[in-house]
Amino acid sequence: MRSIYLVLDMQNDLVHEEGPNGKSPLGEQVRARGILERTAAAIARARKAGMKVGFVRVGFSEGYPECPEGSQVFSGAPKAGLFRLGTPGTEIHPELGVEPGDIQVIKHRVSPFYATGLEAALRAQKIERIFCSGVSTQAVVQATVRDGHDRDYQMVVLEDCCAAHSAREHANSMQSLGRFCTVAGSADFG
């Protein structure tokens, strides 16, 4: 079965210690759970197994024309200068080692399937199973799993490579996702 490992929203604005969210509850959870280190190790195992790797990130063009003004999630981005394409904040964290040939998806909403080329790339690669992880569990991870499930992909979440704004939010999200995916650990992956 052809598989991909999708790394979700592991961009500097969200996970870099020096980034805007580095000192936030999300940044604290990323560090406390060792998310960067585990994700880098999972990427290496995926590559060694010959699996495709993809990176999803949220980003908006100059002037934020794709940013929904009424969104509780994104409406504050323009004022804060977050997620602006072409800035270091929208780049994947350097510890994760993006390589030529990796699938790259830029999204303007929570789900990486909404109005992006992700599904076309997956179909072109004949992908049937999606391993995924990232931040935050209650947003992009949940959206990816649910949308992938409804598109008939076998979904697997690497739980120990995910983080939310609190341990409780992460646990609640993982509990609800169990109906739509297989939950695995990064040590068993690849």
Image (spheres, rainbow, N blue to C red):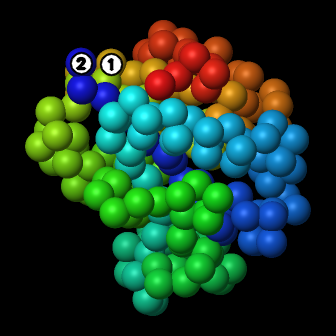
Residue 46 locus on image (x, y percent): 45, 34
Q: Tell which tag, 1 or 2, sits nearer the viewer.
A: 2
Q: Which residue is mark 2?
A: 1
Name the residue at 52% across, 41% down.
Answer: 44
State if disc 2 and disc 1 touch (CB < 8 Å): yes
Quadrant assignment, res 187: top right
Name the quarter where the N terminus is drawn. Answer: top left
**Residue 131 sits above or below residue 63 on the image:** above
Near mark 2 (Cα within 10 A), the count class, few <14, some 14-19 or many ≥20, is few
Residue 131 in view: yes
* Secondary structure under the numbered disc 2 in the rendered image: loop
Residue 29 in view: no
Between residues 118 and 93, which one lies in front from this camera angle?
93
Near mark 1 (Cα within 10 A), the count class, few <14, some 14-19 or many ≥20, is some
Residue 28 locus on image (x, y percent): 86, 50
Please state which amino acid type lies under the numbered disc 2. Met
Quadrant assignment, res 12: bottom right
Residue 121 locus on image (x, y percent): 20, 48
Q: Which residue is mark 1?
A: 154
Q: Residue furthest bottom?
A: 63
